[in-house]
Every structure is written in C-alpha cells, then in structure tokens.
Image (cartoon, rainbow, N blue to C red):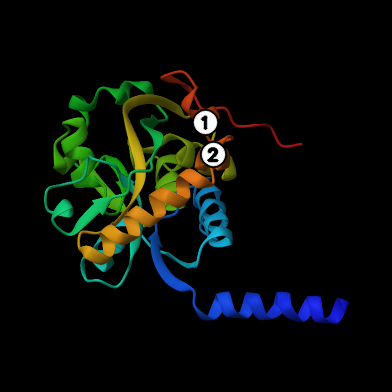
Amino acid sequence: MRFTHLLLITLLALSKAAYAKDIHIGIEPFPPIITEDGTGYAIDMFKAIEVISDLKFHFHIMNYARAKKELKNGNLDLIGLTPKGYETADFYGYAEDIDWGVSAKVDLFTLNTKHFNIDSLPEQSIGTLRGNADFFSELLNIPRNKFIEVSSLPQLIQMLALKRLDVITFERASTMTTLEKFKVRDVFYQNVAKIPASFAVRNNKAGKELKATLDKYLTQIKSNYYFTAYFHYQKMKDAGKVSIPDDE
C-alpha cells in the first residue's frame, strides 16, 4: 500500500512536470531580492508560485540592458527588476509591467559628502549599472554625460572604494548589502528617489495572459511575506552613513 501511494505521488509529479509551462526570466542581480548565484527573495516568491501552478520558472542572470533587449527580441517571457511605471516610452512599446511591485529607494553613495553637490561633479564621475544611466539621468535630472555604466554591482562598489568614481547610484538595499559584503566603510548615502520595483512581460497577447496569471498567483501566495527582511532598508533615514558590522 505504501509503495502504491509513493508511486502515485511520483506519477503525479512527473505528470505535472511534463505539462509545466516554461517561463524564462531575465534578472539583474539586485541583492537581497536577486543575488548573483540565483537566490533571493524574488526567487523564493516565484518558486512558491510553482507549487500552486503549472508554471516552471527558469532564471537567467544578466544585466538590465541585455534583459530588455532579449525581452524585445522575444527570447524572454519576463524581466526584472523594472522601475514600474517609470521606464521609457520605447520600453513600453514592447513591454508591460505586471501589477505587482515592491517599493525601492534609490540613493546616491559617496566617500565624501561634498560630492552630493552634483552640479560640481565632472563628466563620468557618477557610476551606475549598465542599462540604467539614461533612466537615472532623466529621473534625477542629472546630465547624461556625468554618468558612467559598469557591468556589475561589485565592480561599481570597488570603483567607489578606489575613488575612481565620486558617486554611485542604485537601489538602496542591493548597494548596502554589497558594501557590507566587501567591507567598504565610511560610505555616506542620500535618498534621491522612491520607485516601485517590478517585473515586465512582453506587450503582446501572450505577455498579457502571463501578466494576468502572475498577478493572480502573486496575490494568492501573499507575496509581501517574502520581502519582510527587505522592508528594513525602506524604513531607514533618508540620509546617513552606511553601517558595516565589525568582523567577529
């Protein structure tokens, strides 16, 4: 009897896997929401959807610029994290944000608070991740020629630590956790924007159907549960010094 029960469970699992709908997601590392090794709060959230649906998610780590290109070309079904409602008109010509979103704060980070006076900074002195400079330039009303893009968050942090950049700008929690990982101390931050972070599907019939499906399941699994620890960063003061724990 026990063998029969186990066999039935196995057959059901195999049946579900056989008919699973594969969803390919292009994601930029955004720790702790999405880490470079493919873990994080958002990954756990999507895996919870797999349990109650016929969806099977495949995660592809890449920078945001490439993710947008692959979505536009039809090679991905979903990308993230997107600045919900704040992307360019060109982006919304081929993409559409899902309804779900989590509040994210964008900060400036520097080793010297005088650099918060953006007007005094020279060209290519503000670093951000590839695919983000045009967006931040428009959002923050900072000349585009003051930005330089790099391929990864660790690289961005290292360039700040080596004083090759006066300022870097990106989402608060991901930048702070990376600063902590590399033990970069005496970094000051200042909030400059608050943006809902989300995911986007293709702006076509299949994409809209996927959007409706995801929004339904994200409500069912109570998605905010997976971001409880993340909200700590949203409650911090709008300016201050990044706290780096001492080595034990």
Outermost residue toward the front? Answer: 1
Helix, strand, or loop for circle 1? helix
* Total residue callouts: 2
Where does residue 72 sit, x and y in percent of width and height? 21, 65
Q: Measuring 26% from the left and 58% from the top, which residue is drawn there?
A: 208
The answer to whether marks 1 and 2 mark residues whose Cβ atoms lie closer than 8 Å is: yes
- Examine the rendered structure and indicate whether residue 35 appears above or below residue 26: above
Of residue 210 and residue 152, the one placed in the foreground of this image is 210
- In-image side of 85 versus 104 (left or right): left
Mark 2 crowdedness (10 Å alpha carbons): few <14, some 14-19, many ≥20: some
8 or 40, which is in the foreground?
8
Residue type for callout 2 = Phe
Residue at (28, 51) in percent of width and height:
149
How far apart are labels 1 and 2 at the CA level? 7 Å
Mark 1 is surrounded, within 10 Å at the Cα level, by few (under 14), some (14 to 19) or many (20 or more) other residues, namely some
Give coordinates of residue 119: x percent, y percent: 18, 25
The answer to whether any part of residue 17 appears in the image is yes
What type is the residue that disc 1 sits on? Phe
Taking the spot 44% from the left edge, 72% from the top edge, the residue there is: 21
Compared with 28, 125 (above or below) is above
Left or right of 111 in this view: 118 = left
Which residue has dot 2 on it?
A: 227
> Residue 231's mark?
1
In this view, the residue farthest toward the right is 1
Q: Nearer the viewer, residue 48 or 40?
A: 48
Question: Is disc 2 placed on a helix, strand or loop?
Answer: helix
Q: Position of residue 246 (x, y in %)?
A: 68, 32
Q: What residue lies at 31% left-to-right and 43% top-to-bottom?
A: 127
Instruction: State the quadrant of the N terminus.
Output: bottom right
State left or right for residue 138 relative to residue 211: left
